[in-house]
Amino acid sequence: MMKKLTATLVLAFMAVLSFAQQSPVKWTSSAEKVDAGQYKVTITASVPAPWHIYSQNIGDGGPVPTSFSFTKNPLVTLVGKTKESGKMQTVHDKNFDMDVKYYADKVSFTQIVKVKGGVKTNLAGEVNYMVCNDHECLPPSSSKFSVALK
């Protein structure tokens, strides 16, 4: 009887842990042709209340900033840096003892790219981010994306 109870409790605890580790953030991506061979790629995070994710521009010693790594593609050239847009909030976070910038609800990240020779290809990569609420932060997460450029 005790072994069954212990096994049940361990399984229940593992289920709670695995659920708690899943990020509540949902990511979508799209591409819009803006000029001959040039595209605006938009990667959007939908962040349900009470969660938020951090800006790309966070000082050292703070939470993990949102960052992008793009898979090398000889047909695609990145133009400038990835820009972010949304309702940014700046607050003093007592946990990090610093001002932090974050987004709740929705934030979009845009990257301009050039495609060589007008061929169809993809822009792929990964976004790394940290999601927190007023009481806790989940471990840093990553999400892969791939956007058709045609």
Image: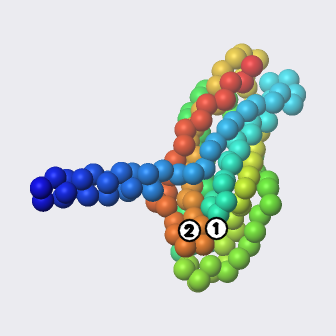
Pick the residue in front: 132 or 108: 132
Give the amino acid at mark 2. Pro
Are the two marked residues, 2 and 1, in contact with CB atoms closer than 8 angstroms?
yes
Q: Which mark is residue 63?
A: 2
Residue 120 relative to residue 129: left or right: right
Give the amino acid at mark 1. Ile
Q: Position of residue 134 (x, y in %)?
A: 60, 72
Question: Dividing the image into 4 quarters, which one contains the C terminus?
Answer: top right
Residue at the extreme front? 1
Q: Position of residue 31 (x, y in %)?
A: 76, 31
Residue 18 relative to residue 83: left or right: left
Q: Position of residue 28 (x, y in %)?
A: 67, 38
In terms of secondary structure, where does tag 2 sit?
loop
Q: Quadrant of residue 59?
A: bottom right
Residue drawn where x is 67% and y is 80% of the image: 92
Residue drawn where x is 85% and y is 23% of the image: 36
Q: Nearer the viewer, mark 2 or mark 1?
A: 2
Q: Quadrant of residue 52?
A: bottom right
Residue drawn where x is 57% and y is 55% of the image: 129
